[in-house]
């Protein structure tokens, strides 16, 4: 008993509203939760009803139940009631199955799954795209169309609090239409085994009030403030810019233009402190086995720290 209480408490502690289908912040996840609740309550009511019928039948005095009565019960409980209940459930659930209308495409966000990180391209209507990585910002109350694809293997894009999973398949673009209804910082993950660091592939989802989102988008378009110095020189001399863009461009690795603004390092796995970033640069495979970034084991720690410090203040 004591043990099960402890286990139960630990399980509950694992439920955090940051990444949970039980704490929805979008329309689709909300209707899924309502439906789940109704189905669970319905199942409990039916199970209790069956148990009650069973007890009554066992306790009924001899001769009280005849064959015709049994057949009537089978007809009602076995055919009529299930047909009515299932039909009612279907009629009730049909509207929720209709995808959100995406005619008003305020914002398209193209997300590409990579081993083991997320390439993000914002495509607001009538504006040039904005490139980012490992973080998705969306405006509350506006329809957002995620365009999902992959470079290497199949990944699955899942923001539990917002909507269901959607596969990311190389050579194909899947669309997921969502609408957030509560501002906050949430978490998304990869839900399809994609290699060694599959479990280390997450991202922040930041749902912002529309005005704040527009301001962020406009600010992100300003050319990044370039700071020179030891970090900048080392970044270039070490060949980091062969894979990482610092001005909103494409590269083999995640765009680092606004790395200082991000809330995680390495696709949702570590706090982006200077020490963690320096350690990641020298040995990315320690925290992320199989990551497609070469280790810089020979780089002196002081140099890695200088780059990390510079990356964090580069941008703004
Ligand atoms: Cu993945």
Image: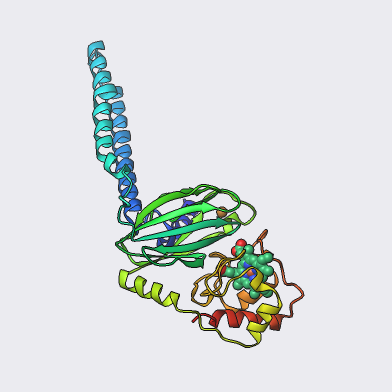
Residue 174 image point, x, y percent: 45, 48
- Tell me if I can see residue 14 in this picture: no
Among the 4 quarters of the image, the one containing residue 301: bottom right
Residue closest to the eye, 33 or 210 = 210
Horizontal side of 76 relative to 177 (left or right) equals left
Judging depth in this view, the residue of 27 and 119 nearest the camera is: 119
Q: Position of residue 204 (x, y in %)?
A: 47, 65
Is any atom of residue 230 visible in this view? Answer: yes
Residue at 36 percent across and 63 percent down: it is 125
Q: Relative to 41, does residue 28 appear above or below in the rendering?
A: below
- Residue at left 67%, top 78%? 236
Q: Is residue 240 left or right of residue 70?
A: right
304 vs 292: above or below: below
**Left or right: residue 251 compared with residue 107:** right
> Where, by quadrant of the figure, is residue 41 drawn?
top left
In this view, the residue in front, 46 or 3, is 46
Is residue 207 shown left or right of residue 226?
Answer: left
Residue at x 50% of width, y 72% of height: 262
Residue reaching furthest right? Answer: 298
Q: Is residue 68 above or below residue 96?
A: above
């Amino acid at each position: 008993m004591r043990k099960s209480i402890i286990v139960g408490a630990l399980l509950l502690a694992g439920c955090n509203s940051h990444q949970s289908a039980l704490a929805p912040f979008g329309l689709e996840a909300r209707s899924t939760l309502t439906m789940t609740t109704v189905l669970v309550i319905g199942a409990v009511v039916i199970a209790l009803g069956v148990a009650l019928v069973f007890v009554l039948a066992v306790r009924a005095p001899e001769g009280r139940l005849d064959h015709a009565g049994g057949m009537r019960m089978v007809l009602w409980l076995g055919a009529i009631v299930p047909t009515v209940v299932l039909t009612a459930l279907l009629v009730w659930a049909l509207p929720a199955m209709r995808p959100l209308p995406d005619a008003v495409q305020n914002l398209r966000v193209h997300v590409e799954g990579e081993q083991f990180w997320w390439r993000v391209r914002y495509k607001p209507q009538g504006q040039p795209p904005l490139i980012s990585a490992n973080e998705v910002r969306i405006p509350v109350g506006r329809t957002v169309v995620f365009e999902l694809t992959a470079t290497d293997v199949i990944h699955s894009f899942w923001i539990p609090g917002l909507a269901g999973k959607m596969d990311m398949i190389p050579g194909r673009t899947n669309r997921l239409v969502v609408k957030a209804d509560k501002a906050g910082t949430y978490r998304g993950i990869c839900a399809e085994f994609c290699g060694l660091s599959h479990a280390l592939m997450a991202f922040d989802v930041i749902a912002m009030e529309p005005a704040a989102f527009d301001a962020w988008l406009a600010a992100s378009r300003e050319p990044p403030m370039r700071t020179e110095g030891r970090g900048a020189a080392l970044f270039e001399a070490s060949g980091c810019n062969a894979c990482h863009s610092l001005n909103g461009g494409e590269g083999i690795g995640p765009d680092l233009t606004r790395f200082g603004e991000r809330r995680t390092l390495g696709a949702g796995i570590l706090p982006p402190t200077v020490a963690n970033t320096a350690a990641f640069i020298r040995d990315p495979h320690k925290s992320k086995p199989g990551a497609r970034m070469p280790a810089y084991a020979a780089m002196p720690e002081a140099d890695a720290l200088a780059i990390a410090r510079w990356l964090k203040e580069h941008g703004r």
